[in-house]
Amino acid sequence: MDIKHVKTFCAVVKHGGFSKAAEALSYAQSTVTMHIQSLEHDLDLRLFDRLGKKTILTEPGKRFHQYAIELLAIYEKAKEISKEKHEVTGSLNITANESVAVYLLPRILKKFKEQHPKVNIVIEASSGINELQRLREGETDVVFRIGEKQTFEELTTIPLRLEKFGWIMPAGYKDGDGLLQQYPFIYTEPECSYRKLVHQVLLENGTTPERTLESSSIEVIKQSVIANLGVAILPHMVTREAEAKGDLVYREIQMPTEIYSQAYYHKNRWLSPVMKAFIDLLSKEFDATEMSGELS
């Protein structure tokens, strides 16, 4: 079995067809067809059904896809093995929500790069959609998100720290009644991991907002509050600097459940030297204990 053929197979699945896969891989379509035929011959399986212009995975094809993802992940990590025994080199792909990517990760990555300067790091900002699925499918190495403490059967969870939340209000706001009568409430996007908890806080306090705004960007929400466009409930780590400068007012609140910054990685995949070094750093920086198991 040729690893190139496995890559081509995964590209056809990802892009939904032979022609799109050929374009993504810079191959002729005939090359993609040849790769798939060769792979089917090697496996003695029919991987795709061709129904007109549609290319659909067969049931054996769906099963092989999971193994193909694993094969490619191991292959990519194997290429990272350094000839120099004591030096960590390779790549680290990180998916993180905006709050963690902007306000937590830079400090961690600064220390990591000081220790391992030859590691290439790619950070993808996540909107909260399919981030854990990308981890399951080997498209990223580690996911950072903020939310309720959770464990998953196939993932290892590292709770990093408990996050404080609070109201953020324009700098000129004075404590008093009628906050949501004075200002619109600015929501995070529906996919945000803690939006439901924020909405629960509003309902429990009998303060359902009549006027609302919404943004997928935490930074946009913060700047909108500073600009007197509304109020919001956000993690304190997002607002700490602006609060210290007097740009906004922060009032801590009790959330319905504890909310943590957490890191996740796939427990069934081979850990490269890069991943081992990064996980070790996380554990030391946050005195974190790894968790794994069924969804809690």
Image (spheres, rainbow, N blue to C red):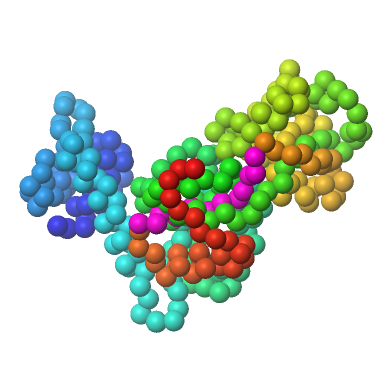
Q: Residue at x 11, y 40 (%)?
A: 46
Q: Position of residue 162 (x, y in %)?
A: 66, 51
In the image, residue 274 lies in the stretch drawn in magenta = no
| 211 lies left or right of 8 | right
Residue 3 figure quarter: bottom left
Q: Position of residue 101 (x, y in %)?
A: 60, 51
Q: Quadrant of the N terminus?
A: bottom left
Measured along the vertical axis of the image, is residue 53 above or below residue 218?
Answer: above
Q: Residue at x 44, y 81 (%)?
A: 86
Q: Nearer the viewer, residue 145 or 248?
A: 145
Q: Residue at x 21, y 29 (%)?
A: 54
Q: Nearer the viewer, residue 175 or 138?
A: 175
Q: Is residue 215 visible?
A: no
Q: Residue at x 11, y 50 (%)?
A: 43
Measured along the vertical axis of the image, is residue 253 above or below residue 139?
Answer: above
Measured along the vertical axis of the image, is residue 239 above or below residue 16?
Answer: below
| 23 lies left or right of 228 | left
- Bounds of the magenta span? 257-268
| 134 lies left or right of 19 | right
Pick out the residue farthest to the bottom: 85
Q: Position of residue 156 (x, y in %)?
A: 45, 54
Residue 106 figure quarter: bottom right
Q: Position of residue 227 (x, y in %)?
A: 80, 35
Q: Is residue 71 visible?
A: yes
In the image, residue 262 lies in the stretch drawn in magenta = yes
| 256 lies left or right of 184 | left
